[in-house]
Image: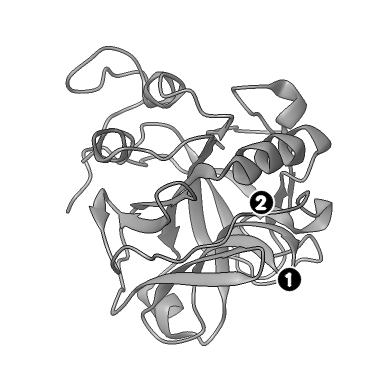
Amino acid sequence: MPVMKVGPGRALVGGGGTYNDLVMGTQPIAYWPQSESSGLTAYCLTNPAMNGTYTGVTLANDLTGPFGTPAPYFDGLNDYCDIGNATFRAAFQAAAEAGEFSVMSWGKVNAGAVWTDGAERNLVRVLADANNFIYQRKAVGNNRMEHDYNGAGTFDRVANTPYSNTAWFCTITTVSDSADEMKGYWDAAQVGGTQAGIGLWAGLPNAGQTVIGAATVVPGSVWHGWIGPVAVWPYVLPQAVVSTVSLA
């Protein structure tokens, strides 16, 4: 499903305000628009104590994202945005251990060849340990994206394959312990089926493995292309909100 484009400062269809206003109206615990044009700080609009730090990222490299603000470029080798500050990690732990949370990222690959380059490339990763983590990533296998969730050692995966989109896309993972469900969405459409038998997250995310655009701050498994807004919610987004924030 194609996404609806809005220009910087323009109102969104169905209501006034910018894309940032739209996302903030859904009450995320963390939201990084990643629209900065200079500096090293990725500003978190929900709480400045959750600001991230860019390393190597080329800011405002794409000016035409469907969310209406500039987006940074990640070179596939050394670039990442570190969001492993103590405030965000504690907030994420609280939401995940309560058993209900959602994660969103906007991505775009550098070129179609990225989908067959044989490398793992992460949009966003939060990891406490080997038994508790969540990824949104391009997999090693050709033309494949994965949402992986491990709660207390119980692993679940949603895969979207074959997938080789070279335009901007919005991808969302929702996790509900009470409903025993994990779901993955691409541009508001659920893909890969609802996963059941999930585990309940336990533990504080690792500071070096809570990252946008890579798997670690070493760095490793770096995204090759652009990443737009990233958000985390302390609840499961209903379909209506998934569609809204996906601009579907």
Locate residue 86, reporting x and y percent.
Answer: 82, 37
- Labels 2 and 1 touching (C-beta < 8 A): no
Q: Tell me which amino acid carries mark 1.
A: Ala
Locate residue 50, reporting x and y percent.
Answer: 72, 31
Q: Is residue 158 left or right of residue 3?
A: right
SS state under label 1: loop
Using the image as rendered, state which of residue 79 and residue 160 is in the foreground. 160
Locate residue 68, reporting x and y percent.
Answer: 36, 31
- Where is mark 2, residue-wise? 57
Discs 2/1, front: 1
Locate residue 205, reporting x and y percent.
Answer: 75, 51
Name the quarter where the C terminus is drawn: top left
Above-or-below relation of 186 to 238: below
Q: Report, in whole angstroms, how far the alpha carbon at label 2 lies from the one at label 1.
A: 28 Å
| Disc 2: CA contacts within 10 A as few (<14), some (14-19) or many (>=20) | some
Q: Earlier in the sequence, mark 2 or mark 1?
A: 2
- Residue farthest to the top, as pictured: 16
Q: Is residue 188 left or right of residue 217?
A: left
Q: Tell me which amino acid carries mark 2.
A: Val
SS state under label 2: loop
- Where is mark 1, residue-wise? 130
